[in-house]
Image (cartoon, helix red, strand yellow):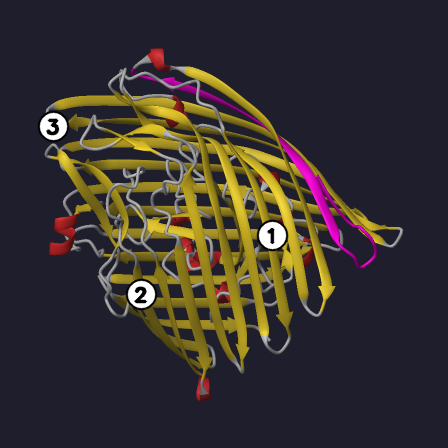
Amino acid sequence: MVPSSAALLAVLSAFRLTDVPVDQGRYPQTARVVESVDLRGDTLADAIGRLPGVVLYNQSGNPFQPTLDLRGWNASPGPATIVLVDGVRVNEADLGQVNWQLIPLENVERVEVLPGPSTIYGKDALAGVVAVFTKRGTKKTEASASAGIGSYGRADADASVRGAAGGYDYAVSGAHAREDGYRRGASSRMTAVNGSLGRRTSKDDVRLTYAFADDRLDQGGSLTQGEFEADPRQRISLVKTDSLLNAVALNGRRTFVEGLSGAVMGQFRERLENTPLNRGRSSVSASAAKLRSAGGAGQLTADGEVAGRRLTLNGGVEGARADAESSSAGSFGAAPFRSASGTRDTRLGSWLTGSADLWPSGPVLTAGARWDRTTIDYKNRVTPANDGMRSYARTSPRVGVNWAPGAGVSLRASYAEAFRAPTSGELSALGPFASTPDLRPVRTRSWEAGAGWRHPAWGEVDAAVYRAAAEDEIYAVFDPVAGFGKNRNIDRTRRQGIEVSLRPRIGKADARLDYAYTEATFQGRFALDKAPFPATQTVTPGSEIPMVPRHRLSVGASVPLPRGFRVGAGGQCVGSSRFFGDEANLERKLPGYCTLDLDASLERGDWTVSVGAKNVLDEGYATRGILSASGGRLERFVVPAVGRTVSARLRWRFAAR
């Protein structure tokens, strides 16, 4: 199967908490929906990485920790995309990063990708939201198990059971995966267990979920251009990490009377991370971190008709606290260092949004706003002079309109704002260097227009054009007076582009074509640190933001054959992009690439056998590039992408009749 982007008619994440499903024709921004049967990949990020507008690359050197962002935001210096699992934000408490390996693909029922500022979700949703919905129990018992093997010592297995008993529904799943690694000596191991217990009645829906994960991941890191060309599987540096996750969440919904409902969510999440070895070319260190978050949200939704026009109102409040304790020690060459810090991020938000038919069966107007306040209290355990506390507050509006004139055509247009507060790592400093407590939050204003067309026999097409203007984006710049780098707000940046999704219907075959043109540029002039240090570069308006390819094309098809056979093929082409460290666009680009994937399966009753090959032509490309100093001169460092891989899987499914 291939992802059915923008194919479903309900957007469950249109509100902060899942409540009344919103028809896609009443949602004024782009929404791409992918169901579990369409998800394929090593991680969830990999599975949705071919959707238009998705920025996906690897900076770790293993296949389980990709970096994902949307519409020209490259997750540097911090992610601009919020990721939710059953309404719970899973961005880590320290830097906002997402550890995709902690969201087992086998436990995912549905994913909704909402590119563009998502006002109702609060701070940090500059690029958009990825909302993940996990599997829960069904009325009839279902069970499944699978095992697979693949290249580079890959072996994995998973099992799950879902059902209902005594008025409650339940779901339990477990998964384990290991591999020796594409990069020699950089192995990975992961174990995950997920559980769900729920109860549904005519008025109530309550669900308790628990997630456990234990992983040990080695990161192969980057190579110089010469090392990459000589042997992309080698590694020079090595980072060994292990972590333990425990998370629990409670979601509830109640219908009070017809047309009036409420939803609540509470959560607690703790992740312990240990890095016993971080060995670079000229450094060695060890570190540890404890990340905790707790919070909740509540909302009310009124949905009904007034004078023959549908009217929906939704409002609520949200509060959360995230604590991070971290420490590290090591040496750069012969110079030892030690750091230790503690951070508390307290967030409070409220929102009100509504949609209404302008006239019966006519255009739908959506408008709303959200107020957010975040307070960051950071303690430097080594240099107390760098302690500090900062608070940020902002109200972000949004407005949009939808219109379905008929013949399967739908039109939409919207305006939205969002902001991101500085992280503690951007505000504070390591060791004796000065903090930057006067950083301002990043603010964006975004415009989008889109159109879609559906035909029951021919398929569907969707297109969107957007522009997002950002102010005070945070960057690490060189300070010629102080003589070292520090964080600073730069005046203006801009992301704009076009996205097209095509889903033709050709008999019983599934097919897709996704294309994105993304233009991410600096719109101001400023000086920026550049290797070999302390050299500087002058960034001018129109310079491209690094690691954002302008062109991205993804195609695929899956064809059923007689006697339970199915074959499929897919490919993607990604254009060239600028290196991190070359914001002035003076160096040659990181080359683009094209890859081809093939797969086949045979289904016999409850059993399915599948085989597949990724990067069939063994395209040798780099997925990330950074300019840095080596031996006192400028050097191009790259992270090699995984070469050709083959895999086989045996799956068993059971469903009670």
Give the secondary structure at mark 3. Answer: loop
Q: In the image, is residue 380 above or below residue 187?
A: above
Q: What secondary structure is the stretch in magenta mostly built from?
A: strand
**Residue indicated by mark 2:** 595
Furthest-right residue in view? Answer: 307
**Residue indicated by mark 3:** 333
Q: Do tag 3 and tag 2 residues touch (Cβ < 8 Å)? A: no
Q: Please give left or right for residue 157 compared with residue 142 in the image.
A: left
Closer to viewer: mark 3 or mark 1: 1
Task: Give, as a single range, the part of the protein colored magenta.
Answer: 353-382
Residue 1 spot, x, y in % from top left: 47, 71
Which label is found at residue 449?
1
Furthest-bottom residue in view? Answer: 562
Mark-to-mark CA distance, 2 and 1:
31 Å
What residue sits 18% from the left and 32% below the top? 532
Q: Which amino acid does label 3 sit on?
A: Gly
